[in-house]
Image (spheres, helix red, strand yellow):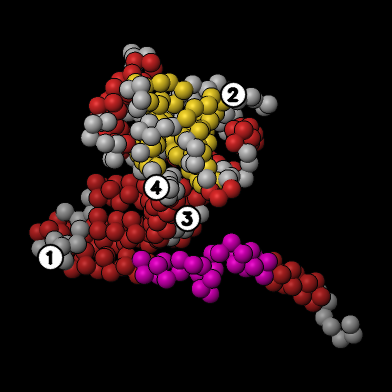
Amino acid sequence: MAGSRPGTAPRTTATARVRKALLRAYRRLRRTGVDYFRGDASDWPAFVALFLLCPLLVFLNIRQPVWCPPTALVLPILAGAFLLRPSSLVLLYAASAGGLSVESLVHAAERSTGQGPPVYQVGVTPGAALVVGAVGIAGLLLAQFRSRVGVPWRRGGSMLFDLRERLRVQSQIPHLPPGWHAEMALRPAGGQSFSGDFVVAARTGSGNSVLEAVVADVSGKGMDAGSRALLLSGAFGGLLGSLPPHDFLPAANGYLLRQEWEEGFATAVHLALDLDTGDYELLSAGHLPGMQMCAGAGRWEVKEAEGPLLGIYDGAKFEGVRGRLDRGDVLLLCTDGMVEAPGRDLSEGMDRLMGEADRLVAGGFRGAAWRLIETVAKDVNDDRALLLIWRE
């Protein structure tokens, strides 16, 4: 352009490039959620409060070291581990480290001048710095875990509680017509809240005249199997009533195969009970046999169906066994935690379970499910589930 000085255009172009680069960096920061100064980060209020708490603690330590030691800086660090993201937590750590440096300098100055109370002679010790640093490392690991899970700490516990309650609701036995009674008891291993054993039941058929129930045992125990049990209980609950009884276990087997879990197998027993006639059919997938007490004969009978474990191979076939519940009869379904023990055969455990259940006949079976779990398998560190159905 006429009248322009040589070299102006190149400088203008370089300035524009720098401006564009800064603008791109600014937009990138906003997309990653680090633009605190515009309030885009969700943890902005908590970050500001904890950041301002650091100089307050430093001031209190300088003025009242007896009541506010240098290790008091772990308080904002711990709160930040639960409230802030890792990127925010690093900035808070920088403020805490700066606070420790200020305290150390002030105490060093007091020692050199000989002023202040005797407690100033201690100051920021290496042990105090190590404590603050160790808590900071633990807090950063916790914040990274929360960031990976994507669940705020305030909601994490409530989500686990909701999941546990959902599993409990899915295990409830539906209301049965007069003359029929059922009880279910579930006890996770080690006193935990989640179990790899679960029970799912529903009224199906025309007029809801059929009770379908599934007692399942997922590989693993306790918390390790609880997530898989929750997923399977929802899937099994959706399959009940949607398919004929003979198609349930093949569909469940296909579902497990599609999950491709490392420990992707489970055992299950499926009961289809006609509430009008008392006729039933048991289909098993590698599960313990059912046990029926015949009131007329006064003895227990083992109802064993054949079938492979769920999630092992495709095209598995399941052969059922039929029976009938007359008045006074009891049908007992359970998982292996009720009968399995080190050094003892499963048949011995089943005999012990049937003997204990037989002892409860005189007092009635109401509340017997929990009593059986407490008395028969109280020393077994395994998940336990028990379903009792009887006809008056």
Circle 2 packing at 10 Å, graded few (<14), some (14-19), many (20+), is some
User: Is 285 located above or below residue 237 in the figure?
Assistant: above
Residue type indicated by callout 3? Val
Magenta stretch in the rendered image:
22-50
Nearest to the eye among marks 3 and 4: give it. Answer: 4
The residues bearing labels 3 and 2 have C-alpha atoms spaced at a distance of 45 Å
- 105 left or right, relative to 30: left
| Image quadrant in which the C terminus is located | top left
Question: Quick one: 247 or 110, which is closer to the camera?
Answer: 247
The residues bearing labels 1 and 3 have C-alpha atoms spaced at a distance of 48 Å
Residue for badge 4: 178
Residue for badge 1: 116
Residue type indicated by callout 2? Glu
Circle 3 packing at 10 Å, graded few (<14), some (14-19), many (20+), is few
The residues bearing labels 3 and 4 have C-alpha atoms spaced at a distance of 46 Å
| Image quadrant in which the N terminus is located | bottom right
